[in-house]
Image (cartoon, helix red, strand yellow):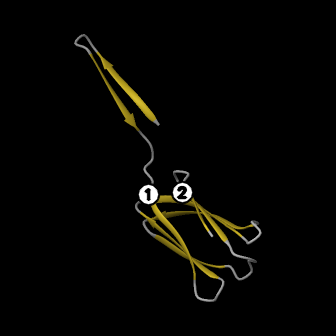
Amino acid sequence: GEYTIEIADKVGKSTQTIVYGKKPTVKAVHVTRIGDEQKYLLAVANTGAEQLNVRIFDGSDNLVHTEVRNIEGNFGLVYNLASVSGTPRFEVVDGTGSVHVIK
């Protein structure tokens, strides 16, 4: 949030505005299909520690997988989605609440 700090004494007063919040560490989220198989690589470019909420939906927008991962730095994981129908959609929410949707 944005905060205004005021300091006052006999000599006068001073006011300063400060913006405080968690700086996002997730720089980019990318999903790529591996060859002709139903395997997908989720890659996250990240600095520092971060908590990710990963949700995967099938082609009909049914939730087929959800997980929370605590990561440190860059992260990558291959998901085998052979049993998922249609084109999957990935939603990755980082600790600041930013939502990354990849289809």
Q: Which mark is residue 94?
A: 2
Q: Quadrant of residue 48?
A: bottom left
Neighbor class of circle 2 (other Cα within 10 Å; few <14, some 14-19, many 20+) is many
Query: Could you give the CA–CA distance between mark 2 and mark 1, rounded to whole angstroms?
Result: 9 Å
- Residue 71: image location, x then y, percent: 49, 64
Place residue 73 in its image quadrant. Answer: bottom left
Going from the N terminus, do you reach mark 2 or mark 1 first? 1
Q: Identify which residue, 38 or 71, lies in the foreground.
A: 38
> Amino acid under label 2?
Asp
Q: Residue at x 39, y 27 (%)?
A: 4
Q: Position of residue 42 (x, y in %)?
A: 55, 73
Image quarter of the C terminus: bottom right
Label 1, secondary structure: give it: loop
> Residue 78, relative to residue 15: is it above or below?
below
Q: Is residue 88 left or right of residue 13?
A: right
Q: Amino acid at mark 1?
A: Thr
**Residue at 37% of width from left, 26% of height from top?**
5
- Mark 1 residue crowding within 10 angstroms, few (<14) / some (14–19) / many (20+): some
Residue 82 or residue 51, whichever sits in front: 82
